[in-house]
Amino acid sequence: MRRLARCEPIVISYRTSRLVTESVGLLETNPIWALKRTTPKVSSRVDRRSVVNPRQARALLGAVRAQQPSGPRLVAFFAVMYYAGLRPEEAINLAADNVILLPQVWDEDSQQWHAPGEEDWGELHIRSATPDAGSEWTDDGSPRERRQLKHRAEGDSRIVPVHPELTRLLRAHLKDFGTAPTAGSSAVSGAVSCRRSPAGGPGSMRARWR
């Protein structure tokens, strides 16, 4: 509406000058044609002051976790949006085959499985999204509809590196809540698939993150 309101005086001036030029005949040429407008420059640079920093993100996730009873289950949902930059419709559609993490290491002393440590990088293979279209606009009456990724062709995908801090949250989510009965039925439905690291190993994933 602001853009339309900004254009309205120009439209009125154009119509008025055209009326004067063609009907009344007082002007030989339309003065609007001589006007030159310089398009203002727009910066594509992101102001770091407006972006949530890691300390603030941890505080926000802690606040989510404190909201009972559903807060703890939603931590991973908000975490993948912050650490991996996923859209909400992509985060809610995560399944086990979308998440690739390093295999856990067996500790003989504690007789337990542990994460690989600081090198615990992984990848998210994002293939589709389920935006909230509304039950009246979907074929099967469900509120969400599976679609291709935004601004991408059908069947296209993208790979997102997973920071070790996010992998710890995903592993904790799987341990505490497991996976949902059906894909997309709850936030971060499919948790962790502990397959071997993709070619290049954690070092290459760290490079992509930077």
Image (cartoon, rainbow, N blue to C red):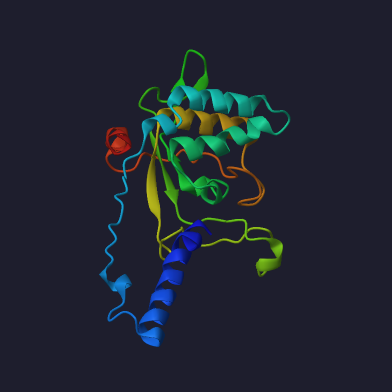
Front one among 167 and 59: 59
Q: Residue at x 62, y 56 (%)?
A: 132
Quadrant in which the C terminus is drawn: top left
Which residue extends farthest right?
69
Res. 38 image quadrant: bottom left
Q: Residue 82: horizontal and vertical position, in percent?
A: 47, 36
Q: Residue at x 52, y 21 (%)?
A: 112
The tally of labels here is 0
Q: Tell me if residue 79 comes above or below residue 15 in the rendering.
A: above
Front one among 164 and 197: 164
Res. 120 image quadrant: top left
Front one among 141 and 4: 4
Q: Residue 151: horizontal and vertical position, in percent?
A: 42, 60
Q: Is residue 92 left or right of residue 50?
A: right
Residue 102, visible in the rendered structure: yes
Q: Residue at x 55, y 37 (%)?
A: 78
Residue 148, visible in the rendered structure: no
Which residue extends farthest top?
109
Q: Residue 170: horizontal and vertical position, in percent?
A: 52, 34
Q: Residue at x 40, y 84 (%)?
A: 24
Q: Is residue 63 left or right of residue 167?
A: right
Q: Residue 43: horizontal and vertical position, in percent?
A: 31, 45
Q: Is residue 158 left or right of residue 169?
A: left
Q: Tell me if residue 15 comes above or below residue 112 in the rendering.
A: below
Q: Is residue 120 left or right of residue 137?
A: left
Q: Tell me if residue 35 comes above or below residue 188 in the rendering.
A: below
